[in-house]
Image (cartoon, rainbow, N blue to C red):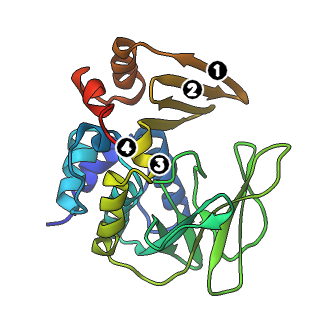
Amino acid sequence: MGIDVDAYLQRINHSGKLDVDIDTLRGLHRSHMMAVPFENLDIHTGAEILLDESRLFEKIVNRKRGGFCYELNGLFAGLLREIGFDVTLCSARVFQEDAPGPEYDHLTLIVHLDEPWLADVGFGDSFIEPLRMNSAADHIQDGIAYRLDGDGEALTLFRRRPASNDEPQYIFTNKPRLLSEFSGMCKYHQSSPLSHFTRKRICSLATPGGRVTLSDNKLIVTSNGNRTERDLSDSEYVVTLNEKFGVLLNRSFLSSSRTLP
């Protein structure tokens, strides 16, 4: 059973054309980033995340939730394929303290058109539109420079914010992977006290002028280069989760989430 494209497009508020070209890919990517939050709340409610396309569709489209990389990019790849795009799932190793992590630490996508494009709707605060892979030049988006550099075998994604240096984000190859191959690391990030996903609740969404984020009970809003932060009470947190992200969870999950590693 294929993905219900119409329901998915409604979920991401996308009404543009669906030709298999870069303009459509850009539009879908941007729409997804603006509508579906990057969030790890299931890890803190104790709900198991399984990498099954139908389950991911039920969560992200039908229940209007978000997810982390395996969920968001895994389902986005299914949408693109249903439309007619040629998509490769790739394993990426995320940099922590200037050293890359293990394989399958992150799931990213290569979309093959006349040339390959890097697509990634599951890396949180990152590029809003896909990046041209055959170019080592800076890709400027919303004042932030993204750059891909490598030796032909592996590519590293760099990000440079204003008045800062290049920061490596992750390294990946174009070797095709199956969604099921990410299950081990998906389980690790749900359960290990060493994973940053078990240490903190996160819910974050791109906005036309920046980004809105809940980091535990701290609300962080960036808009046109300005940043504000505010600590929320538990009741304010639940309301904000609904109003800013469209996520409905009851207050009881907050007390249970504090018992995680």
Cβ atoms at labels 1 and 2 below 8 Å apart? yes
| Camera-side residue of 225 and 27 | 225
Cβ atoms at labels 2 and 4 below 8 Å apart? no
Q: Which mark is residue 40?
A: 4
Mark 1 lies on residue? 228
Measure the alpha-carbon separation of dots 2 and 4. 17 Å
Give the crowd class for mark 4: few <14, some 14-19, many >=20 residues within 10 Å: many
In the rendered structure, which amino acid carries the disc numbered 3? Answer: His
- The answer to whether residue 203 is left or right of residue 118 is left
Disc with the residue nearer the chain's start (2 vs 4): 4
Q: Secondary structure at mark 1?
A: strand
Disc with the residue nearer the chain's start (1 vs 2): 2
Cβ atoms at labels 3 and 4 below 8 Å apart? no
- The answer to whether residue 13 is left or right of residue 163 is left
Residue at 42% x, 47% y: name it: 197
- The answer to whether residue 134 is left or right of residue 190 is right
Mark 2 lies on residue? 220
Give the crowd class for mark 2: few <14, some 14-19, many >=20 residues within 10 Å: some
| Camera-side residue of 46 and 40 | 46
Residue 252 drawn at (x, y percent)? 22, 22
Task: Residue 50: name its quadrant.
Answer: bottom left
**Quarter of the image containing the C terminus?**
top left
In the rendered structure, which amino acid carries the disc numbered 1? Answer: Thr
